[in-house]
Amino acid sequence: MSSQNTTNGAPPTEAFETAIIGGGQAGLSVGYHLMKRGQPFVILDAGARIGDSWRGRWDSLRLFTPARYSGLPGMRFPAPGWTFPTKDEMGDYLEAYAERFGLPVRTGASVKRLTRDGDGYRLECADGRRIRAERVVVASGAHRTPKVPPFAADLDSRIVQLHSSEYRNPAQLADGGVLVAGVGNSGAEIAFELARSHPTTLSGKESGQIPVRHGSPPFRLVVRVIRFLGYHVLTKRTPIGRRVGPKVAASATPLIRVKSKELAERGVERVGRVAGVRDGRPLLEDGRVLDVANVVWCTGYVHDFSWLDLPVLDAPGGRPGRRLRCEAPRAPCREGRPACTVAGTDQEARMALARVVTFDGVSSQRIDDMKREMEGTARPEGLPATEVIVLHDPEAERSLAIVFFATEEDYASGDATLNAMPADDTPGSRSSVGKYHVAIRLTT
């Protein structure tokens, strides 16, 4: 790190090779991999403590993702695999993760503007600090501004109104009925909780629900299937992913834990969408007026990218889309599944290369001989591979070798070593050699 003084009395501008905006799951995962490679960086997080984005949610919130898929690279989540951590446990885990690996996280650093600065970037923080970086990773997420319909301002001032981002527990509400507007997972869970202490009405229509009980053995199978589809099928690297992926990403998430049956059993009344206000009361699309003392808006967030002063948006004030491109020199641009769940962050953070070689005329005996030769031996000199996988088809006598490398430099070294390998040291005649970027590495 270096700093340069300014001439107008402003705080000095610090310089880093990489700046990561956001100290959540994605940002910490990126930091972990940069640290493993010895690359200098800084992580900027707006919260007072690492993990505060989780701690600030409603008190009873638990993750939908099981603990076995909630850990970040290098550190398992400290809970039984098929339990569901609380929001505070997740926040504490992130804080412990950063401490364990010594990640340089600066809390209270809210980035208000990101713009070009020569061949790098300039970050302007809310407290006046400025940072210059050769490359920037935006890992802050898009859910920054709560979305509430404009007519909410016309409701009677005596009605308690909260957005789901402000809701913590039923004690915040006044006596009397509650309207929960919006049937996403937040709306369903909050309505389910409030129905214990308040007459509760839930407005809107859900976009479906997972047809298995959350946490049950069938649910575990569903989780594995969804992970497989997300990492292998619905990506921009497959034709079906390019065709179907945008539709899936734009669609609402089905109900996961609290479903229609549980809501009915708890006594939650279901009504249509809130269309406006009449005489200071919520007006439904069917013309009914609800006499309630509280409204909880579970209506989502506005995707606010106005602070990105870069030509990477579909339109001014819009959102990153098809025209999103890499701006920094040597900054890799990964297409695929966004890190919108805890389980996706390692795949998003990991950058790797693979050399794929196919061999013809490979007998099972030759494969067995190679296995015996390789047992207990050290990695060949000049082959800095992180992993080697050999697949073999004994009937066709054909093999596929996948050699993984962490960096371009390691790949170049390993490629030269493999190309210089005598024919007798290979399992058969090489029929093709290819260089691939590792898009998915799924472990269970």
Image: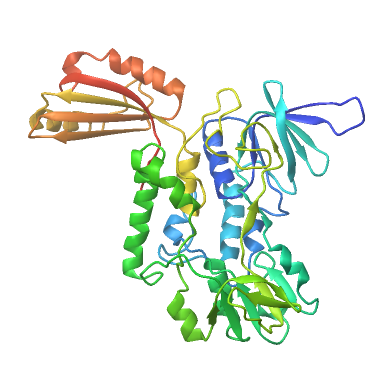
How is this picture coloured?
A: rainbow
Q: Residue at x 73, y 68 (%)?
A: 152
Residue 429 in percent (x, y) is at 16, 18
Locate the N terminus by quadrant. Answer: top right
Look at the image and tell me whether residue 444 can be seen. no
Give the mark count: 0
What's the residue at 62%, 72% (across, down)?
Answer: 274
Q: Relative to 176, is 167 above or below?
A: above
Vertical comparison of 30 with 141: above or below:
above
Q: Position of residue 239 (x, y in %)?
A: 34, 38
Q: Position of residue 204 (x, y in %)?
A: 55, 71
Q: Is residue 404 left or right of residue 14?
A: left
From where the camera sits, is residue 238 visible? yes
Q: Is residue 80 above or below residue 338?
A: below
| Residue at far front of view | 287
| Residue 212: percent from left, percent from top | 36, 70
Residue furthest to the right: 9
Q: Is residue 435 above or below residue 346?
A: above
Q: Is residue 260 left or right of residue 110?
A: left
Could you say which is closer to the camera, residue 257 or residue 19? 257
Which one is in front, 345 or 324? 324
Residue at image location 72% in from the left, 41% down from the top? 307
Q: Which residue is drawn at 69% across and 87% down?
A: 176
Q: In this view, does 386 lie to the left or right of 62?
A: left
Q: In which quarter of the image is residue 358?
A: top left
